[in-house]
Image (cartoon, rainbow, N blue to C red):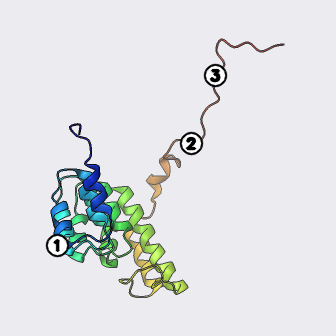
């Protein structure tokens, strides 16, 4: 097998069914990042293994832990302070993250994290209004939808007079310029 190539047998084993807790724990210490990520995505992954993988050096493994439905509050709090913004965004997107932790992310220093946290608070508020909060798996959604919405709007800074000076578009348009026809002649 080539150096650096993923161990396909271990990867297949880590993502397969009917795996003992001891084998899951052993695979969580595998040298291949893809194998550790597959272990972190297992629904039957033990909490202790998830807690250990939350300290992994690779962001993909920590993202898998942050997205896990059984990641506990302490693990999610640890990952909410991660240096990689993708990990923090995964914590905000996880529907099993406690609401107060998502609300704390409304004050994060990165705009994209604040945006996702705001969207998740609004989605949970809408789920409470619609009465589908249990259907979407938001067990930590508490309070009324109006209180959640007001809290989210208060935490997100309103645009002031100096914000109007910035351009409204922050991203490039999704269409490309027409292809040039250099060297091509069209019949007259």
Q: Which residue is mark 2?
A: 173
Element marked by disc 2: loop
- If you read the primary sequence from the N terminus, does the residue marked by circle 1 or circle 2 appear first? 1
Residue 112 point in image, percent of width and height: 38, 56
Residue 41 point in image, percent of width and height: 31, 65
Residue 89 point in image, percent of width and height: 34, 61
Mark 1 and mark 2 in contact? Answer it, CB < 8 Å. no
**Comparing marks 2 and 3, which lies closer to the viewer?**
3
Element marked by disc 3: loop
Mark 1 surroundings: few (<14), some (14-19) or many (≥20) residues within 10 A: few
**Comparing marks 1 and 2, which lies closer to the viewer?**
1
Q: Quadrant of the C terminus?
A: top right
Using the image, determine if residue 38 lies above or below residue 176. below
Residue 127 point in image, percent of width and height: 50, 80
Question: How far apart in space, not on screen, are marks 1 and 2 (Cα)?
Answer: 45 Å
Question: How far apart in space, not on screen, are marks 2 and 3 (Cα)?
Answer: 19 Å
Nearer-the-camera pick, 57 or 150: 57
Question: How far apart in space, not on screen, are marks 1 and 3 (Cα)?
Answer: 58 Å
Nearer-the-camera pick, 140 or 40: 40
Q: How many marks?
A: 3
Q: Residue furthest right?
A: 188
Q: Which residue is mark 3?
A: 180
Nearer-the-camera pick, 43 or 159: 43
* Camera sees residue 5: yes
Using the image, determine if residue 121 lies above or below residue 132. above
Using the image, determine if residue 4 lies above or below residue 35. above
Mark 1 and mark 3 in contact? Answer it, CB < 8 Å. no
Q: Which residue is mark 1?
A: 48
- If you read the primary sequence from the N terminus, does the residue marked by circle 1 or circle 3 appear first? 1
Nearer-the-camera pick, 178 or 160: 178
């Amino acid at each position: 097998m080539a150096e650096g190539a993923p161990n396909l047998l271990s990867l297949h084993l880590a993502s397969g069914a009917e795996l003992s807790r001891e084998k899951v724990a052993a695979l969580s210490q595998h040298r291949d990042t893809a194998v550790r990520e597959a272990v972190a995505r297992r629904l039957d992954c033990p909490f202790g293994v998830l807690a250990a993988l939350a300290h992994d050096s690779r962001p993909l493994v920590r993202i898998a832990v942050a997205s896990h439905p059984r990641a506990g509050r302490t693990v999610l709090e640890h990952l909410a302070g991660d240096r990689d913004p993708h990990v923090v965004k995964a914590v905000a997107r996880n529907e099993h993250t406690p609401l107060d932790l998502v609300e704390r992310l409304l004050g994060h220093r990165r705009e994209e994290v604040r945006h996702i946290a705001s969207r998740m608070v609004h989605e949970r508020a809408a789920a409470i209004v619609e009465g589908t909060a249990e259907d979407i798996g938001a067990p930590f959604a508490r309070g009324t939808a109006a209180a959640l919405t007001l809290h989210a709007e208060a935490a997100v800074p309103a645009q002031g007079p100096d914000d109007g000076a910035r351009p409204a578009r922050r991203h490039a348009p999704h269409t490309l310029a027409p292809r040039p026809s250099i060297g091509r002649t069209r019949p007259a």
